[in-house]
Image: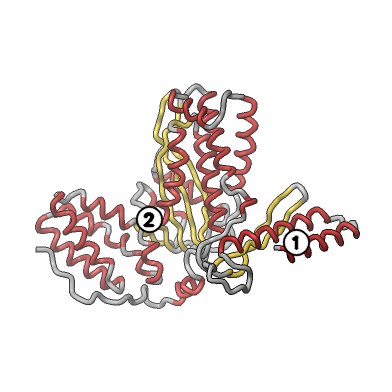
Amino acid sequence: MAAPTVALLEDLRKLALELAPTFLREALSRVLHDLMEFEVQQQIGAKRHERSPERTTYRNGTREREWQTRVGAIPLQIPRLRSGSYFPSFLEPRRRAERALINVIQEAYVEGVSTRKVDDRVRALGLDGIDKSAVSRICQSLDEVVTAFCTRPLEGNYPYLWLDALYLKVRQNERIVSMAVVIAVGVLASGERRVLGVEVGASEDAAFWTSLLRSLVARGLRGVELVISDAHEGLKQAIASVLTGASWQRCRVHTMRNILAHVPQKDKAMVAAAIRTIFVRPTQAAARSQLHEVVQTLQRAWPKAAAVLLAAADDILAHMAFPSSHWSRIDSTNPLERLNREVKRRTDVVGVFPNEAAALRLVGAVLLEIDDEWQVERRYFSQASMERRKELTEPNELLPAPDKPVAPIR
């Protein structure tokens, strides 16, 4: 780092001698650029263009991001890596959510809903007292950031849209109730993932889903071709009325659980294996044919399971109208599992939220962090595969057929 340091000092001297009005901003920009270069070198084990046995990966261009500071907006060129990801240490991606977590626990304490367990955690975080005015100020600043994130305009087309719900305990009218927190995630036509929004509701009826989808459309959501979710009540109706032309993919994993609920424990593995043969078929037509064969077999011993599978036939095969390279990620809500786990890890610390606003504040802060990380990670789908999505004339592409025919259930 000796040569870069000398070059950096020389540039700073020139800026200072010329008394440039943007001296501080340009100086900070150069320092941050060198800091990122140094961090990337440490992470990959080699300098730019250097051959080294310690090298673990290579650079793969940069990603632009603007960082707001006290001296103005600093344009950053964040390095991208071929494998893995790099996030600058000075951006501190975890600060907002940790502040939100501490704040929610404080607010719960102030509102009188704390327990001994929450009090112990407050002390474990190093908080000796509760200052109502400080809590109010922190809440206001966090609410502004989260609200701006959840209401920001959505630009571009989002062919794929995932919707999933988790449940939190919230105090409402002197009662503790379970409230649904619905998270919307989309993939742009260029292949990048984005957190699109979050909403808290008392019930998951058609009115709730319609309101959520309309709010996303009002912010600019367009180009949706496939919505992936569990069989939430009223959702299919809301999709038809708000997202005209979009298909609905019912989560394959949750559907499997619904089917196996009607099968004795000793037969679950065998029935699950038979159902999985549907999804290894190379085309949607072949998968549909296999599904009807499985239904006929199941009807002999487990008619209720067969009825559930038959009723879900169109919805669990909708993903096969898209590129086969996407199937494993668009046939279920599993891609949201990591996101949900991270949200639950934070919200479980709180236990019972004092109100809806506190729940939205913490969940929104966590989602904002995750969205920041996604913006510097590799594309979720390659741009080439997203382009192939437009070129499909048949509803799906071919996958290698199984080497051997699947044995029927005896």
The residues bearing labels 2 and 1 have C-alpha atoms spaced at a distance of 47 Å
Q: As displayed, is residue 360 above or below residue 224?
A: above
Which is nearer the eye, 379 or 154? Answer: 379
Q: Secondary structure at mark 1?
A: helix
Question: Percent from the top left, x then y, of residue 142?
Answer: 61, 39
Residue lying at 45% horizontally and 50% vertically, measured from the top left? 339
Residue lying at 31% horizontally and 58% vertically, measured from the top left? 252
Q: Check disc 2 and report the residue beneath it.
A: 334
Please indicate whether residue 2 sits to the left or right of residue 118 in the image: right
Please indicate whether residue 315 sits to the left or right of residue 209 in the image: left
Question: Percent from the top left, x then y, of residue 148?
Answer: 62, 46
Q: Secondary structure at mark 2?
A: helix
Amino acid type of disc 2?
Asn
Question: Percent from the top left, x then y, of residue 355?
Answer: 50, 31
Which is nearer the eye, 87 or 247? Answer: 87
Mark on residue 5? 1
Amino acid type of disc 1?
Thr
Look at the numbered discs 2 and 1 and tell me whether their residues touch, using CB distance below 8 Å.
no
Q: As displayed, is residue 377 above or below residue 356?
A: below
Question: Of circles 2 and 1, which is in front?
Answer: 1
Q: As displayed, is residue 335 above or below residue 388?
A: above
- The image quadrant where one finds the N terminus is bottom right
